[in-house]
Image (cartoon, grey):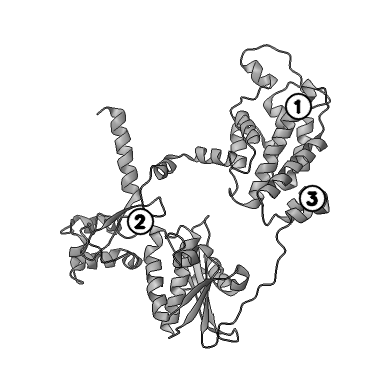
Amino acid sequence: MVVADRRLWQRAAHIIHKNHRVIVMDSGSSAHFWYDVWTGNTPLKDYLPDDIWTTMFDKNCTIQQAFSDPMSNQLQMAFWHCPMNLFTKFLTTYNSQDTWIWCPTQDGHFSTKSVRSILTTEANQQWAILWAPYIPTKWSVLIWRIILNAVPIDGTVKEQGIPLVSKCYCCSNPHEETTLHLFFKSAIAVQIWTELAHLLHFSHADMTSIADNLTDFLASREPEAVAARLIRCTFMSILWEIWCSRNKARFQDQGMSAKHIINRSLFSVRAICTSYKFQKIPPDWIAALCQDSTVKDNLNARIPSAVRWFTPLSGRLKLNVDGAFKSTSGEAGGGGIVPDQNGNMLCAFAHAYHGLNSSLAAEALAMRDGISMCCRNGISKVMIETDSHNLVQIMTAQQACQWDLVCILQDITAKTQILQAEISHTPCEANRVADSLANFVLFCPSLVS
């Protein structure tokens, strides 16, 4: 095996080891208790101090052997040194064999696409933003060429060894035409970026390295946020209109106008907002994009309607639950409340969660904890409401369940049958109390359980 092949397979083995996990399907599991990742994110042996692990007997014991005796040395060591929550989150069924799952996919099945996404660098992920489906291809191509310094501007042509006399068409006192000057430093460009600075939060004065500054600016915001989409669309539209205006000035003797470029850019962005049905557009953007009442009506978010919390049917109680998750810090929490027929609180909870990676996981844990609270308080025939549409679809078998939520949802299913509970979706506006409890955990985790 040549060195390159060896490195390839070593890299593949590392990826497989890092992203595979054992799901324990039976109490008679043949998976290794200490070495296999069957609960949590790492092998249990990683939690043991070096001196304990060195003197440990029977390191190769299976899960079946470890659980065969509740007082076994293996279990006692695990309970003493490992987080206790690891022993309440693994799935057990009556199947005869363990199952390997592939962590990067929701269903746990291996796919070459998931491997490709693992190997994809951050730079490639930034390119994905550039080629978003709502952005016209001609804009993406131009930005791509600007980043690669491949736009046929005088300065770029001269860099290829072709002598020519350069003059820009964007200043009253012409300068040598370069990519940086045309798009960011010229009189026309400065006027445009200054007028739109309050919307784009972009400073043309900071542009020094086009390739780095452009990619950093385009990738510096949440990809799916409406405001971020508007900023990217407007920014790229401005560059496209500057380029088109430059060509008309050079080849058709038409003067460049900053006002004309801004108007055409905003017109294009309005068309994108309408075509792709952007919702919840910020007021400052609505004011900038609207030129007449018709456009304003099309861009405005949906007219809000009154939403209220309805009391449950006679003889039943209602449980409202919600989860909160901050992707930037990984903080998560869940909250829930059971009111009486008059809306007065009977019982409530607010719990902090750790080690989660999605808001759906927080929603599921909040529902589980709410149902557990009902069990402890002897509440049955409860109506459960959540504002997570995905969770409701999973619980009603309309959507496939993620592998890492199977254990939680299995527990929810079992307890809902005991409580004779019904799960339904409710608008966020009717779930405000549970939402407040869940978000309270993020700000005051020391005051909740």
Question: Residue 168 versus residue 238: which sits nearer the camera?
Answer: 238
In this rendering, does residue 292 appear at all? yes
Crowdedness near tag 1: few (<14), some (14–19) or many (≥20) residues, C-alpha within 10 Å: many
* Figure quadrant of the N terminus: top left
Closer to viewer: mark 3 or mark 2: 3
Among the 4 quarters of the image, the one containing residue 58: bottom left
- Label 2: state its secondary structure: loop
Establish if 18 lies above or below 49.
Answer: above
Report the residue marked by disc 3. 290
Above or below residue 268? Residue 156 is above
Left or right of 418? Residue 161 is right
Structural crowding at the residue carrying mark 2, measured as other residues with C-alpha within 10 Å and reported as few (<14), some (14–19) or many (≥20): few
Corner quadrant of residue 413: bottom left
Instruction: Tell me if mark 3 has few (under 14), some (14-19) or many (20+) residues whose alpha carbon lies within 10 angstroms of its own.
Output: some
- Percent position of residue 382, x then y: 48, 81
For image coordinates 70% across by 49% down, the residue present is 274
- Is residue 169 visible in this depiction of the protein? no
Question: Which amino acid type is marked by label 1?
Answer: Arg
The disc labelled 2 sits on which kind of residue?
Answer: Asn
Residue type highlighted by circle 3: Cys
Q: Residue under circle 1?
A: 246
- The outermost residue toward the front is 398
Residue bearing mark 2: 41
Residue found 64% across the figure and 47% down from its top = 229
Q: Earlier in the sequence, mark 1 or mark 3?
A: 1
Quick one: SS at disc 1? helix
State the CA–CA distance, disc 1 to disc 3. Answer: 26 Å
Mark 3 to mark 2: distance in Å? 50 Å
Q: Position of residue 214 (x, y in %)?
A: 62, 36
User: Given contact means CB atoms under 8 Å apart, are the residues at marks 3 and 2 in contact?
Assistant: no
- Disc count in the image? 3
Is 172 drawn above or below residue 371 in the view shown?
A: above
